[in-house]
Image: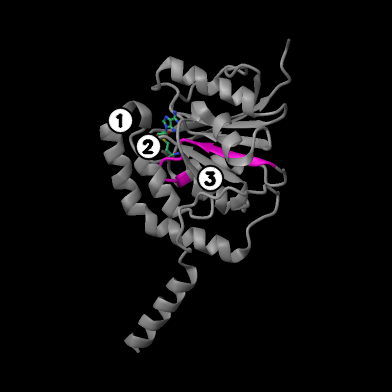
Amino acid sequence: MIRKIKQRVKKTTSMRRPQSGNGVRRNHHPSASVLAPDSRNFVHFNDRQAGKSALSLFLSELISNPRNIGAACPSSNGLANCMASFVPRAEDGYIIELGAGTGTITAAILRQGIDPKRLVVVEKSAKMAEFLKHRFPEILVIHGDAAELSHYLDSHFGAGQWHVSTIVSSLPFKSLPVSVGDAIKEQFQQVLPPRGRLIQFTYDIRPVSAHYFTNFKKKNSRIKWINIPPARVDVFLREKQKN
Ligand SMILES: C[S@@+](CC[C@H](N)C(=O)[O-])C[C@H]1O[C@@H](n2cnc3c(N)ncnc32)[C@H](O)[C@@H]1O
């Protein structure tokens, strides 16, 4: 009986285990199609496996670079699901996640049924980027700086041969140097077309001005209390440039 159970567990595990690979592919074709049910199972399987090592990696990176990490621990599933719920499924174009950390929000975006071919993440920590490549071998993970986003897109997809519909950012603007924050905000304007969507969370839960990001207008806001600490999710839409 025990042997039978062991065999069954082994069979299920090998069916769901992702193919090995470094997660960086060059020919990505974004489309609005959704994941097949099998792929969803595989994301859930990865979630459970990743949890413990994700937390210890997050904490060690926090100790070595607190300003870049800017958070005491990874986002809660509630916060991650809230961020992901604002990602439109029925649109074409790439979805860019900035500062993916150990992938809590990445996993939530995939659980929404977003096609992994549409998802590109940029993460500055080398160890976290490596972790993400193993956790999500089906998406494009770029180890780099969000301030260089358009450059990465040009070099992966061809100069100007890309269309971004949404940026999901958990970058800690309050703890990053102002010059770095400004360079990243400049990229938001450069990469997102009019009506493009920017989803950002912050631990400062006081209401933010409607035009917090230049040339963006706030459309939605939600506080998630079950997170350490509580956080506010804001959704901004790119406006047409005014000049
Ligand atoms: C607050 S943590 C969020 C991690 C994860 N998204 C979560 O919600 O648990 C911020 C992340 O942004 C990354 N980061 C900081 N500055 C960055 C930059 N300039 N470009 C890309 N990633 C950056 C950090 O390494 C860290 O993983």
Residue 108, compared with residue 194, is above or below; it is below
| Foreground disc of the pair 1, 3 | 1
- Residue found 49% across the figure and 72% down from its top: 15
Q: Rounded to the nearest whole Å, what is the CA distance between mark 1 and mark 3?
A: 26 Å
Tell me the kind of residue under disc 3: Asn
* On-image quarter of the C terminus: top right
- Labels 2 and 3: the sequence-earlier one: 3
Q: Rounded to the nearest whole Å, what is the CA distance between mark 2 and mark 3?
A: 23 Å
Query: Quadrant of residue 149 in the image?
Result: top right
What are the residue bounds of the magenta stretch? 93-104
Q: Kindly check if marks 2 and 1 are in contact, taking CB atoms under 8 A apart as contact.
A: yes
Cβ at disc 1 under 8 Å from ligand 1: yes
Mark on residue 125? Answer: 2
Q: Is residue 239 left or right of residue 63?
A: right
Whether 103 is among the magenta residues is yes
Mark on residue 81? Answer: 3
Query: Quadrant of residue 6 in the image?
Result: bottom left
The residue singled out by tag 1 in the image is: 65
